[in-house]
Amino acid sequence: MKTLKLRIKDKHAVQLNILAGAVNFVWNYVNELSFKHLQRTGKFFSAYDLAAYTKGSGEYLNLHSQTLQAVTETHAKSRKQFKKAKLNWRTNNPKAKRRSLGWIPFKKTAVKHLSTRQSGKKSLKSTIQLSLAKGKKLIIDLWDSYNLSLYNINTCELVQDNRGHWYACITVKEFPKTKCGDGQVGIDLGCKDSAVSSDGDQLQIKVTHQYAEKLATAQRAKNKKRVRAIHAKIKNTRQDLIHKFTSKLIKANSLIVVGQIKSTSFTSSKLAKSVYDAGWFEIKRQLDYKCANAGCHYIEVNEAYTTQTCSCCGSRQDSPKGRSGLGIREWFCRSCKTTHQRDVNGAKNILAVGLGRL
């Protein structure tokens, strides 16, 4: 199963906001109904029980029966998952203190791909059809970066981000798989360079520092709309850089070994902001699912002493050690007369650990 996230054109925003309000109404109704039933009988409603109370309401709310079922199923699943008697109230009122972002679910029978066409030299635009109540149809245009014509659509959820933009999250079962290469590479995660490979490739993510001044100006002016836009820009830029780096690794290698390191270990230190900006978790997450898709082996290993050990002779005599050695980016091993770049040497040793040579 794979999820494709596609941007919906802004011309549909008004209609989607109305439908999102109807979905919120159904959610709040079943939420309150389930809670009252629990108080009366001491038992929870299942999704099947809730469906009987929402049957037929789609005609008045302009929602497909499959959408109503998806809402009740998600509510029952969320209540069970979070072990709560009552879930949070949903509202799309822009003046509300705890406004919920728009969400409209559709099942397989209510989604149909109509066409995909060329728009410009490289970009594609697709059109999908969503079923509403009483046989009504909602036609939506998307900016397509995946070419939807190659996939069989399973389900679709329309979701909204904090800037008011709408996206179609489409799940597909069968999709074209990426072919991996035949090389082997080790990855050393760090703060100065987010990731360095044993081949010398570097991933630098300094997005937060790049937009720090603009963000501070917007925050002092209390311009919430601008603040949200800058945060979204930072997130999207970071995601784009990581996607390009990980995809390049998958296409060139059949074995990828990454040092085992947790971002949470640095949350209370002075490095917390740099670690957050580096995106270690996202790098490992993308490598994990992309390797599974391409048939590439992905391993996480203990990276203890990988930076201090010479990747040529195994000596630790001249290597930088402790906090005082963090600023040393290159060092010379007198045992084998080799000059090492700190992170590349660590990546080579991580690969050696993954292969069982160290």
Image: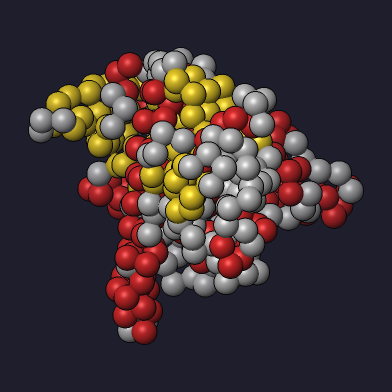
Residue 18 percent across, percent down from the top left = 38, 51
Task: In the displayed orientation, state which residue is furthest to the right.
Answer: 42
- The outermost residue toward the bottom is 220
In this rendering, the answer to whether 277 lies above or below 27 is below
Looking at the picture, tell me which residue is in the foreground, 166 or 309.
309
Residue 153 or residue 140, whichever sits in front = 153
Percent position of residue 219, x then y: 38, 79
Residue at left 17%, top 24%? 117
The answer to whether any part of residue 184 appears in the image is yes
Residue drawn at point x = 36 percent, y = 30 percent: 248
Q: Nearer the viewer, residue 58 or 340?
A: 340
Q: Position of residue 357 (x, y in %)?
A: 65, 26
Taking the image as shown, residue 261 lies to the left or right of residue 162, namely right
Residue at 38% from the left image edge and 39% from the top image edge:
201
Q: Is residue 194 visible?
A: no
Where in the figure is residue 47, as x and y percent of width and height?
70, 35
Q: On the picture, is 67 further left or further right than 164? A: right
